[in-house]
Amino acid sequence: MYDYREEWKQKISGEISKLLNNGTLNEPSTTVSPEQVVVEIPPSPSMGDLGFPMFGFAKLLRKGPPQIAQMVAAGLPGTAAIGPYVNIHLDRGEVARNILREILGQDSSRNENGPSVGQNGPSVGRPNTLRGSRIMVEFSGPNTNKPLHLGHLRNDALGESISRILLACGADVRRVNIINDRGIHICKSMLAYGEHGEGKTPESAGVKSDHFVGDWYVRFNQDFKEEAGALEREKGLSKKEAEAQTPLLLRAQELLRKWEAGDSETVALWKKMTAWAIDGWKETYKRTGVSFDKYDFESDNWLLGKEEVLKGLEKGIFYREADGAIAVDLSAEKLDKKILLRSDGTSIYITQDFGIAINRHKDWPFDRLIYVVGAEQQYHFKVLFLLLQKLGFSWAKNLCHLSYGMVNLPEGKMKSREGTIVDADDLIDSLRGMALEEIRGKEREEAVGSPEEAAEKIAVGALHYFLLQVSPSRDILFDPKESLSFNGNTGPYLQYMGARISSLLRKASERNAAEETTGEPCFELLTHDAEWELAKTLGDYNNAVAAAAEAMDPSLLAAYLYELAKSFSRFYHDCPVLSADGPDLTEARLALSKAVLVVLKDALHLVCIPFLEVM
């Protein structure tokens, strides 16, 4: 995409290279690259649109920055030396024409379902900074004993948005989901259903299938509390002692042993309940626009990695403790000792992760693997990445943990054992209901076509924008009412801006239905301050996408979207479009508005916000 900053960085670097090659230092081969040139925005518009400080070239040219600025400006028409800076007043019409030509010329590659990402050839919002790279993104990672919750929604939004952004930068991306489908917590749901389910199914109970499974997990913990409390009272045990001795927990542990031994009846129950959980999640994933290229299952991988640990023991990377356990001492790396195999030879979680990562690279040799996992697992991934490197896997240096903070509602921290989990479906339903009330309150039912469908898209947009507008590392207090506001920095505000532009373009189309427009709009007429700021913001889109990909931070793109929407709002207020001073100016401003819509739709897709033509 046309980048006026890069264009002038090349001109400045070329002029400095000429100064070097004219005999100043008798080093005719010396050149300065555009990357060495710093660009800034002058403190006052009267000083120019761009400023280039010359401090970095003083040593190279053996002259003072003000003198260098004078020499560079003398060789570049349209520039001025102001102290140590070379300042430029850009040709507004020319820059606007170059930006809008490219955006509007690429509009044919878009469709209602979002942009065609990862395509060959440059296009708007496709910086191609990652072309040729293969990146795997692991995200979601739910447990098959309960439905998705608010924490998963942030994880999913981050994973899906980052995947789309990486694709937009030219990478070949593979989305994977690791399903946690084994362990004592899974057996708790199985036990409760086996003992009390009476053959019920999600269909017969009229309950979404993952919620049906989650209800049995809640039932187990309710019964478990009662049993433990009774033991405390009757036998005078401590809470910890009572919980360890509850018959219910002992039966769940026995069920886990049966599963690991391959007991047919236990495995059949496990498969049935696992399928119910996954089927329910897929409905939620579809609802929120999240997709995966591959599902990995802990049950297929829990024995992996043991062989690699034994190899590390033979090489002296790991050591055996007195009780037979295999461990590694990471004190030299300022980390703790880590057990890798228990004394009885069984694997632990990190051992399993060895095997999964190794198999993934064998199956799909990636250049980078990004784990989207909560901040509480930072230590785990530090150790995992370090040990894989110690085991000799060179690709391990390109493993990355995209850490994110917790999400809470104003009512407090999420809890699942008591059945008070902030359920994903319930939260979206609540947001949809609030959005539907807003639509009906403004009597917009007929205008939007399907109020329920519009409310659903507003709910998902509100949720995703709220979750993605802040840096992943920060904790979030999710306020449903605030997220649904149609004013300010929210998803619905961005959706409304898209609908507003769509309405403007429809009105223009209806007005000019009988007229034929030939030739290119007169972009040179777009010289008003509001038009100029909007055109420059459009020109920054490629850089915003590239920056979000490099930082693995969708909030950078969310911030760009908000600035674009605000910039259009100022333009719309200050620059009449349909009632502009003459048809040529109207046509140019309509073209500018259409370019905003193209970029807005594209960027909304990258941050997982549905587009609405009418609100």
Image (cartoon, rainbow, N blue to C red):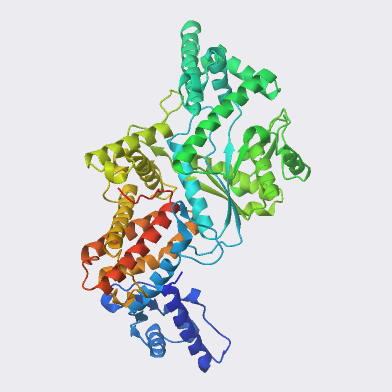
Could you say which is closer to the camera, residue 128 or residue 37?
128
Q: Is residue 112 left or right of residue 89?
A: right
Given residues 380 and 406, the one toward you in this image is: 406
How many labels sit on residues?
Answer: 0
Q: Is residue 48 left or right of residue 390?
A: left
Residue drawn at the location 49% of the way across and 13% of the way down: 228
Residue occupying the far top of the picture: 234
Q: Residue furthest front?
A: 514
Asked if residue 369 is positioned above or below residue 205 in the image, the reply reads below
- Give coordinates of residue 41: x percent, y percent: 34, 72
Q: In the displayed image of the protein, which residue is found farthest to the right?
A: 314
Residue located 59% across and 45% down the image: 293
Is residue 395 visible from the viewing direction of this image?
Answer: yes
Residue 528 visible at all: no
Q: x%, y% of residue 505?
A: 31, 60
Q: Is residue 567 shown above or below 39? A: above
Q: Residue at x 53, y 56 (%)?
A: 167
**Vertical side of 240 occupied by 443: above or below:** below
Nearest the eye: 610 or 70: 610
Q: Nearer the viewer, residue 184 or 602?
A: 602
Q: Which percent across, then down, holds residue 110?
A: 46, 58
* Picture coordinates of residue 514, whole percent (x, y): 30, 66
Looking at the rendering, which quadrant does residue 537 occupy? Answer: bottom left
